[in-house]
Amino acid sequence: MSNVYHETISKMESENVSKEYILGWAGGFQGNPDREEQRLNEAYSAGFEDGKAKKTDGYKAWAGK
């Protein structure tokens, strides 16, 4: 796995980004299937889409949430 993955996760954790966003981002980045519909939420879905797109700066909107 690339350093981008680990560096981005560390950066998000240090900036207190929503845990749901981080979980979604990690899953999307790794190409995992999406969660079941009843477990989806806004933060997870946003993270999943950003991770799937390999976007490393979308988390800033979720810092401190």
Image (cartoon, rainbow, N blue to C red):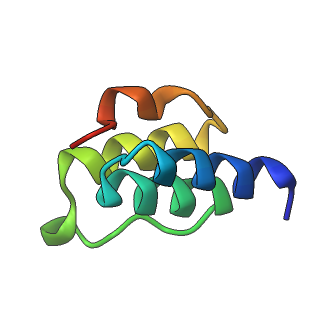
Query: Of residues 12 and 53, which is closer to you in this image?
Result: 12
Left or right of residue 29: residue 17: left
Q: Is residue 39 above or below residue 61?
A: below
Q: Is residue 47 left or right of residue 57?
A: left
Please say if 45 is above or below 1: above
Which of the 4 image quarters holds residue 63? top left
Which of 61 and 10 lies nearest the eye of the viewer? 10
Relative side of 30 to 65, left or right = right
Which residue lies at the image location 58% right of the left edge and 45% below the top edge? 11
Establish if 10 lies above or below 55.
below
Residue for point 61% across, 54% down: 10
What residue appears at the point 67 percent right and 38 percent down from the top-left corner? 54
Kindly give the residue lying farthest to the front in the view shown: 14
User: Residue 56 at what x, y percent from top left?
Assistant: 62, 34
Question: How far across and down, in percent of the image, does residue 1 sit?
Answer: 85, 65
Taking the spot 34% from the left edge, 69% from the top edge, the residue there is: 35
Quarter the C terminus occupies: top left
Q: What is the number of callouts on the image?
A: 0
The residue nearer to you, when weighing 42 against 3, is 3
Q: Position of residue 3 (x, y in %)?
A: 84, 53
In the depicted structure, whether residue 37 falls above or below residue 64: below
Residue farthest along the right direction in this orientation? 2
Left or right, 21 with respect to 51, comes to left
Q: Please, which residue is most extreme toward the left here? A: 38
Residue 33 in the image, given as x and y percentages of width and height: 49, 68
